[in-house]
């Protein structure tokens, strides 16, 4: 699991400035994993020798880890067992969205993704060489919530009274580290469906 942000960047936030380096690294690792799980994808640029997908009979398929920085080929198998490796030159793709379609002018036996289970095998490089700022900030906010100290208010504070002073901490086991702000920041990066 790769960290999606740096310890130095996280330390710029007052709530994490005092955290021990090892503890902060562990928090950021956990937060990075949680963000990738929530978004149903990996963010770090990776070469995928084979990403197996189910064909749905349509002309469009999306990779799970956009953006596509290099598309090599798509191997397709139909229900009768006919198969073909379609080279990138015979495909159109939108790098940022990860959308792949067949080039209508291509010399290929397939112009669609046949219905099947794990019958489309995509070879590509996808993900970010530099993790987007919004994703890094979301990771830090999740780490702050896991640490138990928000940037402006303390999420562990459930109630406080001034007359005859009283202070009650919230049960951290019931706290969701994915606040509305974090969910909004990650919305554009979330992949629906897939594994």
Image (tube, grey):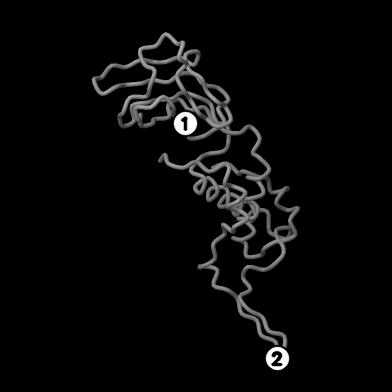
Tag shown at residue 62:
1
Check the image and report above or below for 133 versus 125. below
Please tell me whether mark 1 or mark 2 is closer to you in this view: 1
Name the one closer to the observer, 140 or 54: 54
Residue shown at 23% from the left, 20% from the top:
80
Classed neighbour count for the residue bearing mark 1: other residues with Cα under 10 Å, few (<14), some (14–19), many (≥20) = some
The quadrant of the rendering that contains the N terminus is: top right
State how far apart marks 1 and 2 are (Cα).
60 Å
Q: Position of residue 141 (x, y in %)?
A: 64, 55
Q: Where is residue 65 in the image (x, y as percent from the top left)?
A: 51, 34
Residue shown at 68% from the left, 54% from the top:
21
Name the one closer to the observer, 45 or 77: 77
**Element on which disc 1 rests:** strand
Residue shown at 66% from the left, 45% from the top:
134
Image quadrant assignment for residue 94: top right
Check the image and report above or below for 147 versus 140. below
Q: Where is residue 122 in the image (x, y as percent from the top left)?
A: 43, 25
Classed neighbour count for the residue bearing mark 2: other residues with Cα under 10 Å, few (<14), some (14–19), many (≥20) = few
Count of number-bearing discs: 2
**Element on which disc 2 rests:** loop
Q: Position of residue 161 (x, y in %)?
A: 68, 84
Tag shown at residue 36:
none
Tag shown at residue 164:
2
Name the one closer to the observer, 66 or 97: 97
Residue lying farthest to the top in this orientation: 107
Residue lying farthest to the bottom in this orientation: 164
Q: Earlier in the sequence, mark 1 or mark 2?
A: 1
The quadrant of the rendering that contains the C terminus is: top left
User: Is residue 19 rendered to the left or right of residue 43?
Assistant: right
Check the image and report above or below for 87 versus 183. above
User: Is residue 33 rendered to the left or right of residue 20?
Assistant: left
């Amino acid at each position: 699991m790769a960290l999606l942000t740096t310890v130095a960047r996280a330390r710029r936030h007052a709530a994490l400035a005092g955290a021990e380096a090892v503890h902060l690294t562990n928090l950021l690792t956990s937060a990075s994993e949680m963000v990738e799980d929530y978004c149903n994808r990996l963010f770090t640029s990776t070469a995928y020798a084979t990403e197996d997908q189910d064909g749905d009979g349509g002309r469009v398929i999306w990779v799970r880890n956009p953006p596509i920085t290099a598309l090599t080929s798509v191997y397709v198998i139909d229900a009768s067992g006919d198969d073909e490796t379609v080279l990138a030159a015979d495909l159109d793709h939108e790098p940022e969205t990860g959308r792949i379609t067949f080039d209508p002018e291509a010399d290929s036996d397939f112009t669609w993704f046949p219905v099947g289970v794990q019958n489309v095998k995509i070879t590509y490089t996808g993900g970010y060489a530099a993790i987007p700022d919004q994703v890094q900030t979301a990771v830090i906010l999740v780490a702050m919530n896991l640490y138990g100290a928000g940037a402006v208010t303390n999420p562990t504070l459930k109630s406080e009274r001034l007359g005859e002073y009283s202070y009650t901490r919230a049960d951290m086991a019931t706290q969701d580290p994915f606040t509305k702000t974090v969910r909004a920041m990650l919305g554009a990066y979330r992949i629906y469906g897939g594994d």
